Image (cartoon, rainbow, N blue to C red):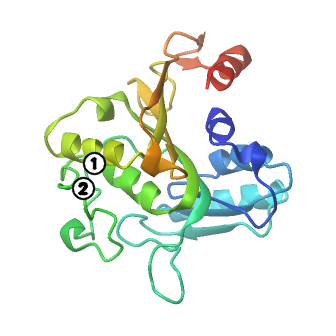
Amino acid sequence: RVMAKVIGINQSKSQSESIYDPTCGSGSLLLRAAEEAPHGISIYGQENDNATRGLAVMNMWLHGHQTAEIFQGNTLSDPQFKKKETGELQQFDFAVSNPPFSNKNWTNGLDAVNDEYKRFDGYDNFPPKKNGDYAFLLHLIKSLKSKGKGAIVLPLGVLFRGNAEGDIRKKIIQRGYIKGIIGLPPNLFYGTGIAACLVILDKEDANIRKDIFMIDASKGFIKDGNKNRLRERDIHRIVDTF
C-alpha cells in the first residue's frame, strides 16, 4: 500500500491506465496497488514460476480483475509484454516490483551486453553477474512510459555498493529518474532478514529533477512473531511525509 500511495495511483484517471509488475508472484502487490485506483486500472504481470503464476491468475479472478494479463516467463531473459509493431518493451503508466533480492542467476538466458531491449544502454556498465538488483531496476525504468511512475523494493546495499553498481547508480541519478528513497525496517520480507529500501521512480520532469527526497522509516514497526511489520500508523506516517 505504501508503494501504491507514493506513486500516486489514487490520482489515476481511468481504467485505460496501466499498472505492471515484472515479478508479480501470486499478485498481491498488484492487487493492493489496483485497490488505490479510483476508476479501476488495467493490470499486467509476469511471473517466472508457472504454479505461482496460476495463483496470481486465480487471485485476479477472485478480486474481480478478470481482464488482468498475467504471463509466465523469465522477465529479464524473456519479457512477455512487447509492442507488436516494433518488438520493443511495452511501457506502462505505473509499475511496482518486489524482485528476488541480489539474484545470482539473473543472467541465465540473457546476454546483457547485446540486450535486444536496450535496458542497459547508456549506463556505462552492466550489473554484476552475481547480483541482479540493478538488472531489475533498469528493467522497471525501461518499462515506464515517458511520464510513468514506479516503486521497487531493493536491498539497502543498492544505495552504497560501488564498482559497476556505482557507475549505474550515478547515471540513473543524473537522468533524474529517482524521485525518492524510503529506508524500511529490517526483517520485513519473507525469505530475508536484511534491511530494504523503496526506490520511487518518476520519469515526469526527470530532466529537471535536481534532488532525491529521502526518508528513514527504519524505526517505525512492530514485531509480529519472528518478522517485523508496518503498522497502519507507520504506513500513514511514510505516505504523509512523502
Q: Which mark is residue 123?
A: 2
Question: At label 2, which amino acid type do we have?
Answer: Tyr
State the residue at coordinates (36%, 73%): 117
Which residue is situated farthest in the bottom direction here?
85
**Callout 2: few (<14), some (14-19), or many (20+) C-alpha neighbours within 10 Å?**
some
Q: Which mark is residue 204?
A: none
Say whether residue 149 is left or right of residue 162: right
State the residue at coordinates (36%, 50%): 175
| Disc 1 target residue | 171
Give the quarter of the image for residue 106: bottom left
Give the quarter of the image for residue 53: bottom right
Mark 1 touching mark 2, by CB under 8 A? yes
**Callout 1: few (<14), some (14-19), or many (20+) C-alpha neighbours within 10 Å?**
some
Which residue is situated farthest in the front direction here?
208
The correct choice, above or below, for 97 with respect to 55 in the image is: above
x and y, in percent, of residue 227 in the image: 53, 19
Question: At label 1, which amino acid type do we have?
Answer: Lys
Which badge, 1 or 2, is on the more N-terminal residue?
2
